[in-house]
Image: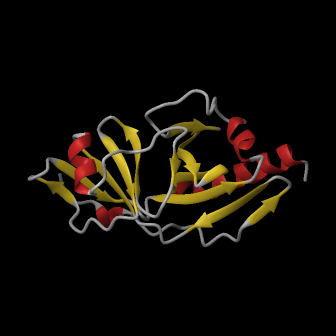
Amino acid sequence: MRNDTDRWAATTVGQKAPASFAGVTMSHVTGLEQTLISGPRAAALSHVQLTSAIGWPDCATGERYAVSLRRDRVLAIGFACGRFGWNDEAGLAISQMSQGYGVVDLTGPDALPILQTGTELSPKTPSASAVRLWHGYDLIVYALGHNDGFRLHIPAALLEAAWDMLSRQAKLIGGS
């Protein structure tokens, strides 16, 4: 596999100021190391020295964790993996995605209802994958640190539009 790391242009959306609405706060997270690892799950997790990856509605804690996207793909958060491209020894394709995904933290009692406006998403219906289609946007979504917090990884080219949709849904749900 070739190394396409340099093909990801820096996110075109500038740093967004936190936005607060009745019942929810949206924060644009920058500087988060994101690495996409494709290949056998055990090898991918071993590469980043973890034993499991979170899915939906699992909760990420700490600064380093992996998110399950498919049975053969994880997004490692907080790991600087060094070499990108094909790793022949491990049988893994490793891609730097820090500029490929914009990250938004959504917190507050209305966070889950806002996410539920655009997809069927219930904490009572677990899934090994954290990938969801929300209002037509492919998102990676999982709980973050506490019951009313979620982290969204959004393709960078769609971050501006998804931020706008999140804001509109927050206004509708929160009434502000």
Query: Where is residue 144 drawn, in percent x and y?
Result: 57, 53
Residue 136, quarter of picture: top right
Note whether 83 is above or below 110 in the view shown: below
Position of residue 157 in the picture relative to residue 66 (left or right): right
Note whether 132 is above or below 170 in the view shown: above
Name the residue located 23 percent from the left edge and 42 percent from the top edge: 42
Position of residue 163 in the picture relative to residue 156 (left or right): right
Name the residue located 8 percent from the left edge and 53 percent from the top edge: 89
The total of numbered circles placed on residues is 0
Note whether 12 is above or below 141 in the view shown: below
Query: Where is residue 99 drawn, in percent x and y?
Result: 44, 64
Q: Residue furthest left?
A: 89
Nearest to the observer: residue 117 or residue 129: 129
Q: Which colour scheme appears in the figure? A: secondary structure
Name the residue located 41 percent from the left edge and 66 percent from the top edge: 33
Name the residue located 38 percent from the left edge and 59 percent from the top edge: 97
Query: Where is residue 139 drawn, in percent x and y?
Result: 54, 45
Note whether 127 is above or below 94 in the view shown: above
Nearest to the observer: residue 62 or residue 78: 62
Nearest to the observer: residue 70 or residue 159: 70
